[in-house]
Image (cartoon, helix red, strand yellow):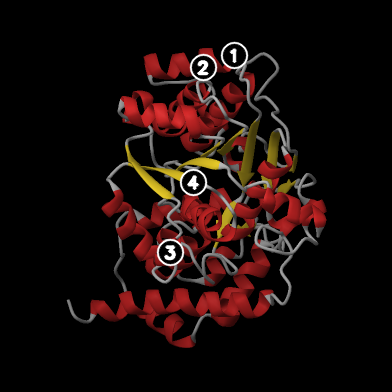
Amino acid sequence: MTALHNSVEWYKDQVVFLTGATGNLGGCLLYKLAVQLPTKKIYVLCRGGMRDAINKWEASMPEQIDDILDTGKIQCLVGDITRPSLGLGTAELEALQKEVTVVIHSAANFSLFQDLPESIRDNCVPVVDLARLSISFQKLKAFLHISTISSKSFLPGGTVLEDAENLSPDEDPPEKQLEEVLSTGKSPYTKQFIAPYGQSKYLAEQILLSLDTPFPVLIVRPTNIGPAIKDPCPFYGPDGAIPLHTFFELLFEASERRKFEDLATLPQDIIVDEIPVDIVANVCLLHLAIGTIGIVQAGSQLYVPVTFGEYMNQIQKYAPPSLVEKAGRIRVEKNVHFANQANDMIQHICRDWQIDCERSKPFKSMEGPIGLALPGHDFEVFFQRRIAKRARNVEKWIDSLKQT
């Protein structure tokens, strides 16, 4: 309890600069930093302005947004992570340089369908530029970059360690790889990754760890992020931000994927590695507080590992018969791209990986606002309610077809 208390108290008087605050993990981090921790101030980079940010928060956590804003800690800076100096004015940049003690970069475009140059521009260049800009932050104590387990998708299987393993011992230096992509739009290593997104995150990790910075760098690699257990609220997770929710909906909305037996040929014993978003947020916040440096992974070892076969059995068990019956009768696609998305989603999920999370296991028994313990949580009940909520969304879409 003392260790957790000290971790919470570490945030007293910290001034945080947070990117991606309107996203899934970013919104959860914002809630915890503002409401649950004694943080002094939170600078939030808002590309569309404060009104746009509030609209997104009201959509994803409508009952919590007033609590967040009422703390008086939030200061919106209108800017863009992809622009030089974040697109900020001189006075705003000087305020960051004088005040910020913690940088958390959670902004990302996690589309698996971007081409490599686009993904590099969204997911690699901004964090490298932000780290270099942060060297001018006079009080900076820690820099956190949210990466992804997809950065290790060049591995064919086996245990994925919390390290910076290279593609190959003779690959080009990461800065040279980045220059090549920016100048030619291509890379000889792209085919080794599931998608360009993973390669862009891999390069970001490699460059960050090679930089000579006066502050410690922490990189957190989540696996598939799932809905929240409790924070900001149960089942929190903006639409489109939960990979396994998208997969569930594709099962019923893409006609070629509606038969459960068609999925029986896939490896049934592979772990579908998913972890609730609020547990990922706690992993981030705990490791920042204790001064962890390097790479930390956040996966189902810290929650409940579920195999693909078990996951499909749970869907069959809890999906309402009305949904199964309705889905079997329709012959239209919700989106012409969904069938391809389903194939890519299945490929992304079904990798024979065992995700090592050893650096966080000591916190599994810790309770409190940023602890990893889940007292009273019933996974079976939670999953059942989760499937019921997703099923209602799909049935609503099917029912709407009768109106057209």
Q: Mark 1 or mark 4: name the one nearer the start of the chain.
A: 4
Q: Is residue 87 visible?
A: yes
Mark 1 or mark 4, whichever is nearer to me: 4
Q: Is residue 309 above or below residue 56?
A: below
- Checking the image for residue 250, the label placed there is 3
C-beta proximity under 8 Å, tags 2 and 4: no
Find the distance from the CA under tag 2 to the CA under tag 4.
37 Å
Question: Could you classify mark 3 by the number of other residues whose Cα lies within 10 Å: few (under 14), some (14-19), or many (20 or more)?
Answer: many
| Residue 4, label in figure | none
Residue 150 is left or right of residue 17, and the answer is right
- Quarter of the image for the N terminus: give it: bottom right
Q: Earlier in the sequence, mark 4 or mark 3?
A: 4
On screen, residue 2 versus residue 26, left or right, reads right
Task: Determine which residue is flagged by label 2.
Answer: 177
| Left or right placement of residue 349 versus residue 72 in this view | right
Identify residue type, mark 2.
Answer: Gln
Query: CB of mark 2 within 8 Å of CB of mark 1?
Result: yes
Q: Is residue 82 visible?
A: no
Q: Which mark is residue 41?
A: 4
Q: Residues within 10 Å of mark 2 (few under 14, many from 20)?
A: some
Q: Position of residue 204 (x, y in %)?
A: 54, 28
Mark 4: which secondary structure? strand
Would you say 378 lies left or right of 150 here? Answer: right
Q: Are marks 1 and 4 in contact (CB under 8 Å)?
A: no
Q: Which residue is mark 1?
A: 173
The mark that comes first in sequence, 2 or 4, is: 4
Of the pair 300 and 27, the residue shown nearer to us: 27
Q: CA distance from mark 2 to mark 1?
A: 6 Å
